[in-house]
Amino acid sequence: MSKEEFCKMISVSEPGPGDGGNTGSWRVRRPVIDLEKCIPAKTGKPACFNCWLYCPDGVVTKTLPPTIDYTYCKGCGICAEECPSGAITMVDEASFIKEEK
Amino acid sequence: MHVIESGNVAAATGVKLARVQVIAAYPITPQTPLTEKLSEFVEGGELPAEYIPVESEHSAMAVCIAASTAGARAFTATSANGLLYMNEQLHWAAGSRLPLVMCVANRGVGAPWTVWNDHQDTISQRDLGWIQLYCADHQQIHDTVLKAFKLAETVSIPVMVCYDGYLLSHTYMPFELPEQEEVDAFLPPFAPTHFLNPEAPRNFNSVTLPDVRPDLHGNTAPGYMEIRKTLQGDLRRSLTEIEAIDEAFGEIFGRSGTPFLEPYCCDDADYVVLCMGSLSYQLHDVIDTLRDEGVKIGVMGLKVYRPFPDAAIREALCGRKRVIVFEKALSYGNQGALYADVKSALYSAETRPAVNNYILGLGGREIKTQHLYDALTESINNEAAIGDEPQWIGLKL
Ligand code: SF4
Ligand code: SF4
């Protein structure tokens, strides 16, 4: 059986952002990182990264500072829940739409 | 080698010769001696497999799913309520296209509680997406287990091997045991092309949305509906594989030629009885008696129930006067499931025979030759009296 045939038989996904479709369109609240509070951003050291570790969609980067890919971030809020310094706030998407207007 | 053993042992020796790698099972009457025999084989070092005792049938199927996903040849067996307890995992095994093989020693389903034979357990599981094969004697049980692994691994669809509880599972009959080398030539080791592999992590059977989705590489990955359509297409195509495997089996073991229907006295028959399991062999005596009386009658044992071999059924039954479907199960609130399937297969036939439906042997109710004779005589002589409602054989109240 070829890989192509197998991929028609069942749903197969690889770990990585975007293999569940455009999950960013699901989001009603957006995680926003406050860099004043974020440990690695504040200290300039690669530390913490709980948001990167816990994000079920793998859309947070392990960088200084961490960034979020909003194309695929589904807005679940796990990162905000897990952030030890309260640096992530979930903000209503509606407020961004107002801003854009 | 010629041996005399029980039907459960015929199944167990088939599983052993198939060099199964993982067995997970929970004992339930009348399947128990099969799993006991397998644990003996493993314990005694005759079968180098993992035998995983589990706390339920649901877990047995879950273990088999995991083992098969990791690339192992896996097997389980059950009966009746145990089969039904697996139900959710059975759908999962079919949807994830795992080549599992499971024996079911057919038993009636409670309530009321029964441990005796009928076909309600597997018939009620006909829409899972599994292949269902039925056996008429011990040789067929043994052979079908071997063929089932080959079939499952060729089409990536799990296969149920069904045989009558007690009537076959616990009775002793002579049958031929092949040599290991012959089986190895027929059934090479399971070589999955895709399995769980830490080197290349994948999520199998991940959630699908109503629509198709772009995958990580920008290709369009199938959605739920495409995946289900593929299963249906592959099940229909497996009818061709069943024929090919029957032929390949015959070349090595010398037993083949009736992949779907096993006819007895059917060449010139105006009347044909259709049924599944050991009942078709029991009917040979009745057919002989009726033949002596000059009735042109025969019986066909159906060996493949899902995918339904409708073309073979049409070809075999088109032009007959009457088809009489004997069933040990019922689609409650309607008719016998097999009866409905046979009628649907015949709908597009040029000349459609009349079809009658008899329900018998539920919960192990004894099936007497005289009762079969009477039912057939009634069906043949009082054609108009029998409508579309299933008739019952052997009722006492
Ligand atoms: S909201 Fe959820 S998906 Fe988005 S970045 Fe946080 S954890 Fe990841
Ligand atoms: S969890 Fe909070 S503090 Fe830690 S890296 Fe993420 S945003 Fe910064």
Image: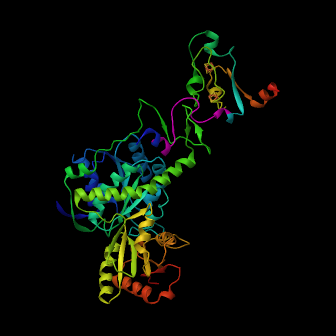
Q: Position of residue B178 (x, y in %)?
A: 20, 56
Q: Position of residue B257 (x, y in %)?
A: 30, 65
The residue shown at (47%, 61%) is B126
Q: Which residues are magenta?
A: A6-24
**Residue A40 in the image: above or below residue B189:** above
Residue toward you, B277 or B233: B233
Residue toward you, B149 or A53: B149
As for residue A7 lying within the magenta part, the answer is yes
Quarter of the image holding residue B102? Answer: bottom left
Residue toward you, B36 or B292: B292
Query: Ligand 1 quadrant?
Result: top right
A71 sits left or right of B250 in the view: right
Residue toward you, B55 or B105: B105
Can residue B33 be spotted in the picture?
no
B133 sits left or right of A35 in the view: left
B42 sits left or right of B202 in the view: left
The residue shown at (39%, 47%) is B64
Q: How is the image coloured?
A: rainbow
Q: Position of residue B310 (x, y in %)?
A: 45, 66
B138 sits left or right of B340 in the view: left
The residue shown at (36%, 53%) is B151
Q: Position of residue B173 (x, y in %)?
A: 23, 68
The residue shown at (24%, 57%) is B251
Looking at the image, the residue that sits furthest to the top is: A44
**Residue B394 in the image: above or below residue B162:** below
As for residue B12 lying within the magenta part, the answer is no
Quarter of the image holding residue B104? Answer: bottom left
